[in-house]
Image (cartoon, rainbow, N blue to C red):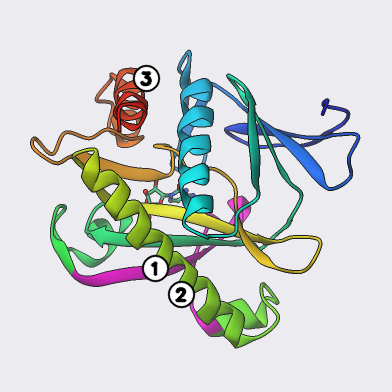
Amino acid sequence: PKKTKLLYEGKAKKIWETEDPDLLISEFKDSLTAFNGEKKSEEAGKGALNNKISAELFEYLNEKGIPTHFVKLLDDTHMLHKRAEVIKIEVIVRNIAAGSLSRNLGIPEGTELPFTLVEFDYKNDELGDPKLNDQHCLILNLVREPAELDYIRYMARKINRFLQEFYRELDLKLVDFKLEFGRDKNDNIILIDELSPDNFRLWDAQTNEKMDKDRFRQGLGGLAEAYAEVLNRIKNR
Ligand code: C5P
């Protein structure tokens, strides 16, 4: 498959159409953004690291029976995947308090949550991705019926269990992450987007060192080195 027309350019990826109407190519960029695009930078090699980490995680979840858009890794920065209609909900899954949960509710960073929290944010940059409840999702027609929200929550928790198991073996703690879902051509809800340290908080299990985009958000430096270490642990699994 070859890139034909640019379909969409986002903050971290370009999405290309191919000769096959059902298949798209994601091109992972080196650009980094945080705080809804207010903080910007470039990090050489980040796109390739995210592409490869995502491919490994999609393959793992596919093996576990999770339906995803992933087809195959094409090269360092390109991934082939199914076309899907994006459901404009950012599904946030949290095991340990950090980030906006700590800020908004005053739960100290690092507090283990009594159960896995699944939250929905509206995927809308202009509005700054506000929090949604189920009624908001229905009023905005983001899904067709309430049962779809329950299905998305069910899948998010199941994916969390598989990923927690995966990262535990790598001596990493899965603090929280964001998932996106879409509808494929058969109207099935599938996991889409990417699975990378841009969208996951991962802490070293021994030292609690941050191995994710918080290195950029918090100006800690060493982002590419941390992502490379995550990929290295995955490869040596
Ligand atoms: O910022 P917050 O604490 O709400 O983020 C929770 C998790 O979701 C983090 O792992 C973050 O990387 C991810 N996230 C994301 N894209 C967003 C918002 C959050 O990947 N637009």
Q: Secondary structure at mark 1?
A: helix
Q: Which of labels 1 and 3 is toward the front?
A: 1
Residue 87 as seen in the image, left or right of residue 24? left
Which label belongs to residue 62? none
> Looking at the image, is 82 positioned above or below residue 234?
below
- Quadrant of the snapshot with the N terminus: top right
Report if residue 38 is visible in the image. no
Q: Quick one: which residue is furthest to the left in this view? A: 206
Q: CA distance from mark 2 to mark 3?
A: 33 Å
Residue depicted at 53% across the width and 36% down the height: 55
Image location of residue 125, percent across then percent down: 59, 50
Number of marks: 3
* Amino acid on which the number 3 mark rests in the picture: Ala
Which residue occupies 14% across, 41% down?
Answer: 205
Instruction: Name, please, the residue furthest toward the top.
Output: 44
SS at badge 2: helix
Side (left or right) of 204 relative to 149: left
Residue bearing the label numbered 1: 157
Residue contact at pointers 1 and 2, CB within 8 angstroms: yes
Q: Which residue is mark 3?
A: 224
**CA gap, disc 1 to disc 2?**
5 Å
Q: Which residues are magenta?
A: 114-134
Q: Which residue is mark 2?
A: 154
Between 77 and 233, the one nearer to me in the picture: 233
Q: Mark 3 CB in 8 Å range of ligand 1?
A: no
Give residue 105's position: percent from left, percent from top: 24, 67
Residue found at x 48% / y 13%: 44
Give the side of residue 117 with respect to residue 58, left or right.
left
